[in-house]
Amino acid sequence: MSEKILVVDDEPDIRKIVSFLLKNWGFEVITAENGMEGLNTLGNEKPDLVLLDASMPKMNGFQMLEQIRSNPETRDLPVIMLTANSDTNNIDTAVSYRIQDYITKPFEPYELQERIDKIMSKVK
């Protein structure tokens, strides 16, 4: 069974590109377009990793991350922030929520794959 990754991003093009890449790398992919939808999907799908954007409507990535970490069932779930926001305050906030990595857009596909593989090798 392949690992499942939840991609949460409000940009349809980013969801499509990242999903395409992940599927080619052998992952099962589920998507959500905001934090609220992401939390609902998280509860139903039980992914092995979350790729999470910071800036989204309804519930941003940091609010979703706070919910993930406050839930005993998901508090240890690996999360990679994949966002265009490179502000150090946002990076510090994400790190305070024990994210596994912080990748800024635009990103290099090989770099994303390398970082995901590193995290997934620890999850197995």
Image (cartoon, helix red, strand yellow):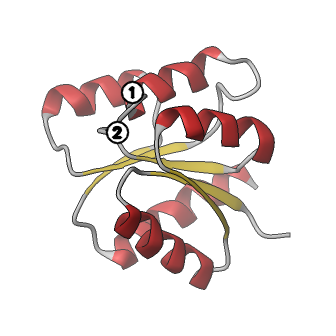
Image coordinates for residue 43, horizontal then vertical, percent: 75, 35
Q: Residue at x 49, y 35 (%)?
A: 35
Q: Quadrant of residue 54?
A: top left
Residue 27 or 11: which is nearer the viewer? 11
Residue 49 or 11: which is nearer the viewer? 11
Image coordinates for residue 18, horizontal then vertical, percent: 45, 70
Q: Secondary structure at mark 2?
A: loop
Q: Secondary structure at mark 1?
A: helix
Question: Looking at the picture, which amino acid does disc 2 mark?
Answer: Met
Q: Confirm or deny contact between disc 1 and disc 2 (CB under 8 A).
A: no
Q: Residue at x 29, y 38 (%)?
A: 55
Within-10-Å neighbours for mark 1: few <14, some 14–19, many 20+? many
Q: How far separated are the C-alphas under marks 1 and 2?
A: 10 Å
Q: Which residue is mark 1?
A: 62
Image coordinates for residue 39, horizontal then vertical, percent: 62, 33
Image coordinates for residue 33, horizontal then vertical, percent: 47, 49
